[in-house]
Image (cartoon, helix red, strand yellow):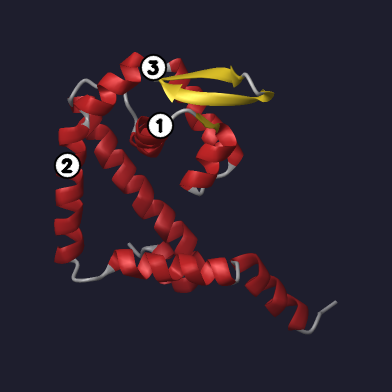
Amino acid sequence: MTDLVRQLGPLAVASRFKRLSDRLYRDISRIYAELDTDFEARWFLMLYLLAEEAPLSVTEAADRLGMTHPAVNQIVGAMTRAGLIASKRDRHDERRRLLSLTARGRRLHERLQPVWHAVAGQTAGWLAEADADVLAALDQLEAALDRREMYVRVAETLSAAPRHG
């Protein structure tokens, strides 16, 4: 059977990145489940960030992680329901919520250190096996989009193209 995403090449590059990301998240989430840990791989960055830099507002967390405000709110909501994050109003600005880990979140952060060490080691091995400097390539791709986002690139192409009726 033909892999349509692969076949479409540059047209489906975002779908290919998403597919690879989903696959990695799924595999790591299986590890957490096997360890009987109520934790999802997509929560990793928030747990790590808050262990290092809390308290942070939702906006600050979104900026630090390069994520949208709604995406951060979704993750924070799920982690709050899991008892990992607490939020309180900023006493200097009532509109801001400040996020920090609960005691349970801090314990989980400590407990997951060996898992993350294994993930980092195996990821480095997988990247070496692929014989590609993927991290450097990702840095270059992100920098190119920082210089000129895809929206602008496509919009310019479409505005220069002749219009058909």
The residue depicted at 32 percent of the width and 62 percent of the height is 1
The vertical placement of 79 against 62, above or below, is above
Residue at point 49%, 27% (across, down): 76
**How many C-alpha atoms fall within 10 Å of the one at disc 3: few (<14), some, or many (≥20)?**
some
Find residue 37 and report its horizontal and vertical position in percent: 25, 22
Q: Is residue 149 left or right of residue 124?
A: right
Callout 2 touching callout 1 (CB < 8 Å): no
Tell me which corner region of the image, top left, top right, bottom left or bottom right, holds residue 9. bottom left
Instruction: Write down the residue under mark 3.
Output: 102
Position of 4 with respect to 30 (left or right) is right
Name the front one of labels 2 and 3: 3
Q: Is residue 19 above or below residue 46?
A: below
Residue highlighted by disc 1 = 50
Residue 163: where, in percent of width, then height?
A: 81, 80
Q: Residue at 54% across / 25% down in the picture?
A: 98
Give the mark nearer the N terminus: 3 vs 1. 1
Q: Amino acid at mark 2?
A: His
Q: What's the distance in space between the residues labelled 2 and 1, CA to CA?
A: 18 Å
Return the disc, 2 or 1, that comes first in the chain's sequence: 1
For marks 2 and 1, give the one nearer the viewer: 1
Residue for badge 2: 117
